[in-house]
Image (cartoon, grey):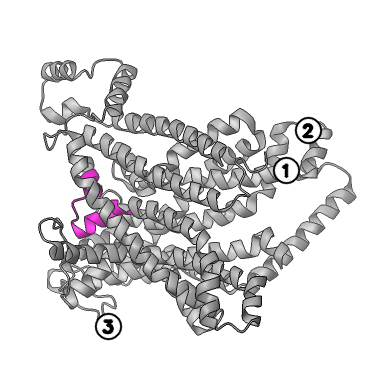
Amino acid sequence: MAVEQHGGSEEDGGFLSESQKERIRAFAKKFRSNTKAMVGLVIVLSLIFVAVFAPFIAPYEMNDTSVEDRTQAPSVEHPFGTDDLGRDIFSRVVLGSRISLYVGFGAISGALLVGAVVGVVSGYAGGLTDEIIMRVMDAAMAFPPVLLALTLLVVLGPELVNVIIALAFVYTPYIARVSRSAALAERNEAYVESAVARGESDTRIVFSEVFPNCMAPILVQGSLNVSFAILAEASLSFLGLGAQPPRPSWGLMINTGRGFMETAPWMLLFPALAIGIAVVGFNMLGDGLRDVLDPKVEAIE
Amino acid sequence: MYNYVLRRVGFMAVTLFLVTLIAFAVTNILPGNVALVILGPNATEESLAALQAQLGLNRPLYVQYFDWVLGLLQGEMGQSLRFGEPVSALIAERLPRSLLLAVSATLIAVALSIPLGVYAAVNQNEAPDVAASMFAFIGISMPIFLWGLVFILVFAVWFNIFPTGGYTSPTESLLGSLKRLVLPAGAMGFALTAYIMRMTRSSMLEVLSAEYIKLARAKGMSQRVVVLRHALKNAVIPVITVIAFQFSYAFGGVVVLEEVFFWPGIGRLTLTAIQSRDIPLIQGCIIVVALIYMISNFAADLLYAYFDPRIRYGGDE
């Protein structure tokens, strides 16, 4: 497969992979020297670690209720305190990371899959196809994101899988728009002209040549959108239309904690802190990636 | 510029048409149509069929859609099932309250962020700049509803300075109305501050390195005069665009924020409509919110084009 894709002579293939290696090394070096990107990466990796090993990290079962332990302040046994049903908040926050990441990555993977293809094809095709696709995307972006997700959830029903579907739908146009402008810029590059001159099909040019060159801005947008999706899931669950009890969604925990603001503020504070850290992590990673990958910044320097 | 505006208005009309299609489609594939909502789950087949015929729900979908759009054009959005009032009247009552909230939030954000941004730019890479950008980062990284809850916790529960929520009409009591506005508008404004501050900072940095600023400095003008009279005037132009975008963001955010503060605006109306499956009300709310969101984004685009004559629509064409 790989041999077939590279085609050409042996030397050609060797040269390409060497230059790619060089580019990856340069990228890694720039990435390491960018504090924001590194801090973001560390936070995101820690979150993934916590989510993967959540059952081993959480000291209690997330749904273990206990009447005598209701709304206890943080202590050695319960570092984040307990909620109104006597459940350990630390355990629930730890397990809640799974929901946030599941929704964040799930929704954005869906949006990336559809949005990147639609956007790149639209930008490369141009003309009427582009016009029609972009107008439809405009219409989807004319709704405030949370409102659109809410409306879709009414149709789909309040379930976590549906939250992912709804948010994938909401963020697709944002990815598509970025992919389109990347493809527009690539369309006039010499390598596309020479591919056309070689008589390659449009499908091949779009997917094996233009597409890989649009990856940088698409990935930046993707990682920033993961943080939006995490925020949106929290908002939807807070409104009662996302994850349903007894799932340990951070947004849902905040919704419950709201009623105990005076007597047990820790019910609200710790899940809130968790959301903040997750969002800061993805934002920093996205911002850092933009600094590292953005060719415009490089040109100025 | 004139052509640009015309094209944009044309596109907006197309977008608006697509928006009505989406709103209609989404609410018409809802499980259980209007008749079922009115009669409840125990209704008989016959009574359902009779009511559907009476409401015109047995007509083909495109006829219903056409009818609905014609009504929309005349400001007629049907009767709310839950409230038994015309949807347009309900929206007319709630919408100004939401706008009041979004406008106040934007004003608070502007008042906070421009001085902060200027201060950060003047002290580039020093402690105040780092502190300001951290502040901005934290502002962006928390959902608006969380800021709302934090504000309630601190200012209403712990210090008891402001009420936890609710709404008082300004005509009823101006002071009471202001008191209830401070927390929700403050929370939203705080969340918006970050973007405007970042923009002010980078715009100021760009202007401060310009030749004419160096000249002004060389002429011996004080830092204060250079920064406030010469630099800020030009730096504020791109910031205005961001402010317009932030307003639409604020308006989009009220859906959640109003729920936090029990603010009876269009956001809570939408939520109530959704929870009670009040289809005509859902449709009306969606259309109105999308329309305002679109108009403010459009205004931001126009401002952007107005201030940057290099913009040619379509980019590379």
Q: Quadrant of the C terminus of chain A?
A: bottom right
Amino acid at circle 2: Glu
Q: Quadrant of residue A231?
A: bottom left
Residue on which the image places disc 3:
A76
Q: How far across and down, in percent of the image, does residue B224 sit?
A: 51, 81
Residue on which the image places disc 1:
A209
Distance CA(mark 1)–CA(mark 3): 57 Å
Q: Is residue B172 magenta?
A: no
Return the chain for callout 1. A
Tell me: residue B12, above or below residue B255: above
- Kindly identify the residue that appears in the image at 63 percent across and 49 percent down: B310
Query: Magenta region: which residues?
Result: B253-270
- Say few, some or many: other residues with alpha carbon within 10 Å of mark 2 (under 14 / 14 to 19 / 20 or more): few
Amino acid at circle 1: Glu
| Mark identifier at residue A200 | 2
Relative to A242, is A182 on the left or the right?
right
Q: Quadrant of the N terminus of chain A?
A: top right
Q: How far across and down, in percent of the image, does residue B8 sit?
A: 50, 38
- Say few, some or many: other residues with alpha carbon within 10 Å of mark 1 (under 14 / 14 to 19 / 20 or more): some
Residue A102 seen from this side: no
Q: Are marks 3 and 2 in contact (CB under 8 Å)?
A: no
Q: Main secondary structure of the magenta part?
A: helix
